[in-house]
Amino acid sequence: MHRILSIGLWAAACFFGSIGTAFADPVELVLRDGSFSVSGTLTSFDGEIYQIQSEFGPLTLAAEMVVCRGATCPTLRASPENVTFSGDGSLNSALLLPLIQSFAEHQGYTYQLSQELAGQITLFDPNNDEAHAVFTLSDRNSGDAILDILNDQAHFALMLRDATPEEQAALKKDMFGALDHPQNSLVVGWQDLYLYSQPSNPNRIITMSQLVAMLGEKPRLWPLAAGRQYPAILTGQEDQTLALKQLLRVVDDIRPMPPKGVHTPGRLTVSTDQVTQDTLVQVSVGCGPQAMPAEVQTHAHPLQTPIYLIAAPKKMQNFTRAFWAFLLTPEAQDAVQRLGFTSRSPEKTEIHGQSGLLINAILNTDMDMRTEDLRQAVLNLNGYERMSLTFRFLEGTQIMDAGSQSNFQFLKRLFVNGYFEGRKILFVGFSDSQGSADGNVQISLDRARAVRATIATLLDDAQLSDEFEVLGLGEGLPLACNDTAWGQNQNRRVEIWVK
């Protein structure tokens, strides 16, 4: 029997810390059905796992499986759980720390910020002031944050950008699994990126296509304006510039820098801060050489980068696991929205509403797109409201990206909480303009079915396949122009429409 109990033994003493000689008296751990017991010296306990030195050697037993008997047991207390984050300093203070505070309030704990160590917050039991968890936030760039979790120096890496191919390979090797698995990483929210040029540069509005050409083609040039054209030089913090290139699908290993001391008009600076407006460059998602007027652009900022939280490849303890689960709850996502970031919190948009969704789609429609596709989209969705939750796909596939995988747990919680009760739900698939029109309608329908089937599986309710309708609209209602990889990715999606 002790072989069964000892399945999954692991070096918890190193991770949790040893209780030591304070518990030298023997204790007895008894299965709750009384079928087996083992005696020995208790060496550690974290509130969830007992470690005992027994006649069989060291054993690890789950607290939920056994009852502890002995003089030592009533006074047994776990040490506070330590949870360490490595990540961008601005995100730590503006996003992560408030989320930890929201988590504490949601779980019924009090909390206190350390006066000696910046970025450390302790959670207490309000009934006895016992410390249950210590969260420590370390300011690191994304590359160093990845190294911290690979070197077992942090539980989580908070990143403004996606992991590079080299970082993904290292993580996959260490995790023995894919980085986009929902147990390994999730998207906490999205942050806007802003672009600024020098005051002497007359370019203040550019299209997404022009931006991709500026950063991805050679020679890198700004659009011609006022009879002048400048070499385009991208500057800014490394994580932010890399996040922009990842967003635009621009592969560029060389990062040219302007001559020292020269403020060239061609300098383009990327930042997460919205600063002086007279140097802000507005980016339009419209097709064609002219930028789309600001009044008909959708409310969503076109340059939004995902904020990733990557978990270290180790077993999560109580608070670590609870905080991870909390991040995808409606309460946490509402907090993300309040903090000034883009979240998964439901935001409905009518097809004829003030956001200009229909006008935006018409202006982004390719010249060779079938008018019938756009007509069917309007007819089928009239009377519905679109939610902000979107599932995006790799080109020509039903494979979703990491952000979309995280959406499922949030969507599941909405269903469980009754958010959709009494409403008609429509899963609507879309495609980019690559391939034939008929083929795009089919693949968009397949994607809608895949999302519906996945949520039905998560809810263990096969009837969802019958209750909720699916619709494939192919190239209809494009969110962006299809002449860039970014635009095509925006259009390959499944949306949820309700009424």
Image (cartoon, rainbow, N blue to C red):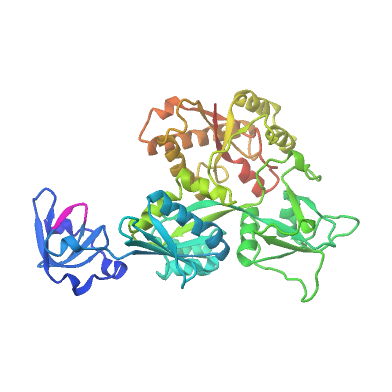
Please give the count of numbered marks on the rendered protein.
0
Residue 499 visible in the snapshot: yes
The part of the image, by quadrant, that contains residue 395 is top right
- Residue 378 image offset from top left, x and y in percent: 65, 26
Q: Quadrant of the C terminus?
A: top right
Q: Quadrant of residue 377?
A: top right
Q: Give 377 or 237, whichever is nearer the viewer.
A: 237
46 or 113, nearer to the observer = 113
Residue 407, image x, y percentages? 49, 44
Q: Give left or right: position of 377 versus 15.
A: right
Task: Say left or right for 463 vs 28.
Answer: right
Q: Residue at x 76, y 43 (%)?
A: 294
**Magenta segment:** 63-68
Instruction: Pick whichever, 119 or 309, lies toward us.
Output: 119
- Residue 47 vertical placement versus 493 (above, below): below
From this viewpoint, is residue 181 visible? no
Q: Quadrant of residue 136?
A: bottom left
Q: Is residue 389 left or right of residue 113?
A: right
How far across and how far down the image is residue 112, in percent? 43, 62
User: Which residue corresponds to the image point at 74% horizontal and 38% vertical from the top-left?
Assistant: 296
- Which image quarter holds the N terminus? bottom left
Q: Is residue 436 left or right of residue 6?
A: right
Q: Residue furthest right?
A: 227
Horizontal and vertical percent for residue 110? 40, 56
Q: Is residue 412 magenta?
A: no
